[in-house]
Image (spheres, coloured by chain):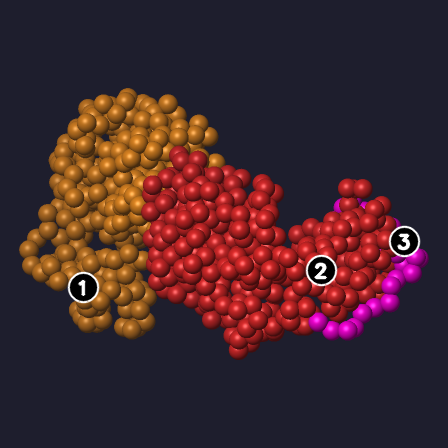
Chain colours: A red, B orange
Amino acid sequence: MSRHSAGKSGIALTEKQRIAWLRLIRSDNVGPATFRDLINNFGTAERALEMLPELSQRGGATRAIRIATKDEAERELEFCTKFGAVFVGIGEPHYPPALRQIDAAPPILAMKGNGATAIRPSIGIVGSRNASISGVKMATLLARDCGAAGYTITSGLARGIDTAAHNASLATGTMAAMAGGLDQPYPPENIGLLKAIWDGRGVAISEMPFGWEPRARDFPRRNRLIAGTSLGVAVIEAASRSGSLITARLAADFGRLVFAVPGSPMDPRCHGTNTLLKNGSIVTTEALDLLEALSPLSNIDLFAQPQVEEPAYEESETFHQPPGDVERSMVIDALGPTPVEVNDIIRHTQLSPSSVYLVMLELDIAGRLQRHPGGLVSLSFAD
Amino acid sequence: MSRHSAGKSGIALTEKQRIAWLRLIRSDNVGPATFRDLINNFGTAERALEMLPELSQRGGATRAIRIATKDEAERELEFCTKFGAVFVGIGEPHYPPALRQIDAAPPILAMKGNGATAIRPSIGIVGSRNASISGVKMATLLARDCGAAGYTITSGLARGIDTAAHNASLATGTMAAMAGGLDQPYPPENIGLLKAIWDGRGVAISEMPFGWEPRARDFPRRNRLIAGTSLGVAVIEAASRSGSLITARLAADFGRLVFAVPGSPMDPRCHGTNTLLKNGSIVTTEALDLLEALSPLSNIDLFAQPQVEEPAYEESETFHQPPGDVERSMVIDALGPTPVEVNDIIRHTQLSPSSVYLVMLELDIAGRLQRHPGGLVSLSFAD
């Protein structure tokens, strides 16, 4: 796939835009939600980049935030190209369609492999690293049969269940969501598997910068990619409080189906999956259980019309006047350590929504705003 | 317990009544449903016994049916007493309260052991004879913890799961439902367990005559006793098309809760239980799952007022005139090989319900009526 191909649908970023997007998402205090709000407020990534120092200052940052330079972004883009990978922006043709639907989707993904794999309907298959023989067998059967039915099988490249799911779907197309940079395979024993994926038997995706070594806190974010790209997630063997359960919870939050394979209550590796079943996940003993439940979802216009849901990402020149000091104080006073809804702040302060959003953006860029699931926000105690 | 003790509630059969009940249920073509209809129509078992030859003849029997003699019934009662057991009629204080609620409950049960065990709220625990180690462990945990919580644990005395469930609840009280006569232990290796139950660490029940060796077709009837006596049935390991699934289906038919322990889809012993889970049985990994689901049911007035639901079993002297030949022909013409509802026959023939029921009783006693689940009836092709 070419990073400039616009295909039949979707936007195509210009080289200049792609560099601006990359600079913006790689700058301090800019996560996917902030990125989205910046584009919504300032129309383009370039204008948002210009505004960052001012926003940070108005938001009360105690020191200047680090903004990725044009040079850095160009070097990352160059590295990406040499690596045989591409950066795909949200709304571009090879961006995974289901991922676009989630709240605060990554604005840009690094991808290497067969881009077609990324845009087919996907099923996530995850589970214990320390899997049993029958767990591995189950992952193999589900991945093979769902792959044969036309689904991309997405997993996290981890040991155990993930590895089995990827291996069993190399023939049909598998997607590996990586916790570190695209060039940072983990665990080391799966480098061969990852190379097969890079070589076109699937696709690897990452939202982290090239060179980023995965740390413990990056794995929940990787799990979010698995849940976000999949129409349904199947969990095979998961202990209580395991990462697979995070993936399952995220999938449920995104309105995706959660499947769990039953197992003996005597095996701690099945405690998490059995708990999922108690909470209403779909009992799964064969691929048919997944295929039957997902078939009504697999042709939704999510795949037919990739642009519909993201008009805000069509860059524009509209932006708003900065809020005054009085307005800023009112919003800060209304915020506290307890997460609240933005609408409540608007109602409480009786300010215009755009003013409230702008103050929050300032606080965010200044590192003083914390974002919580469900779009809630609170004041950060970090500084 | 004494077979004459009326306790605080319920009826107490006289010796004469008990012998008449025993004669009636031991006679040809008289099952629990026919027994109930006979008492409803003729007021007492004695009057029903008098009517049997006439009913059989009017129903078109080709040869005389065998009616248990007074002598035979007295001998069985005597054997029962010498054996240290009792016959308990439906509505008597030691008759299992939940069993009284099912359609066509056995009118009389032979019981040996601690009668108090039979009238406590009960949980059925059943499963594979060829159980895994972890299945046996699960049965042990569930039976022990539910027993400790005050429930009688009911099972079928079979190898594997049943044996483990009984053994783990000997300390708190276990109920064994037998497929053959009360004096016919099966399988032979469980004679020691059965003796402990007979000796008061539980209670054994049977609806079959003393001396009756269990045959394959008697086991579903035994399963009906387990399902009928229990507020909920837990299935631990069950292959597809196994007897435990019959017990689960019967329990569901009786409006009881069905619990299933999840297991690996790779183990054929878990196919039945996983299918139960797919069909809505309660995911069960510990006793708490049973206790929480059952606690609202364990104090229903089923146990406080054992008589309320069975007024028909208070013998009376009311009975009806026999139907005429025209009426009889109309009912027979309305019946066919396809099971139908009795109400449909009443509507179709426009005869009085009592006439229709009496003709059906005649056909039944003559061996020409087949009864199906849900109270449906059809003409028998047996003769």
Which region of the structure is painted magenta? A315-339
Q: Nearer the viewer, mark 1 or mark 2?
A: 2
Q: Residue at x 71, y 71 (%)?
A: A315
Q: Nearer the viewer, mark 3 or mark 2?
A: 2
At label 1, the amino acid type is Leu
Real-space Cα separation, disc 1 to disc 3, in angstroms: 87 Å
How many numbered discs, if any?
Answer: 3
At label 3, the amino acid type is Ser
Q: Which mark is residue A70?
A: 2
Main secondary structure type of the part rendered in magenta:
loop
Q: Which residue is mark 1?
A: B379
Residue A334 seen in the figure: no
Q: Is residue B217 above or below residue A113?
A: above
Residue A334 painted magenta? yes
Real-space Cα separation, disc 3 to disc 2, in angstroms: 34 Å
Q: Which residue is mark 3?
A: A329
Real-space Cα separation, disc 1 to disc 2, in angstroms: 89 Å
Q: Secondary structure at mark 2?
A: helix
Q: Residues within 10 Å of mark 2 (few under 14, many from 20)?
A: some
Dividing the picture into quadrants, the one containing residue B376 is bottom left
Q: Nearer the viewer, residue A83 or B85?
A: A83
Q: Position of residue B3 (x, y in %)?
A: 30, 30
Q: Residue at x 37, y 61 (%)?
A: A172
User: Quadrant of the image for the C terminus of chain A?
Assistant: top right
Same chain for mark 3 and mark 2? The answer is yes
Which chain does the numbered disc 3 sit on? A
Which chain does the numbered disc 2 sit on? A
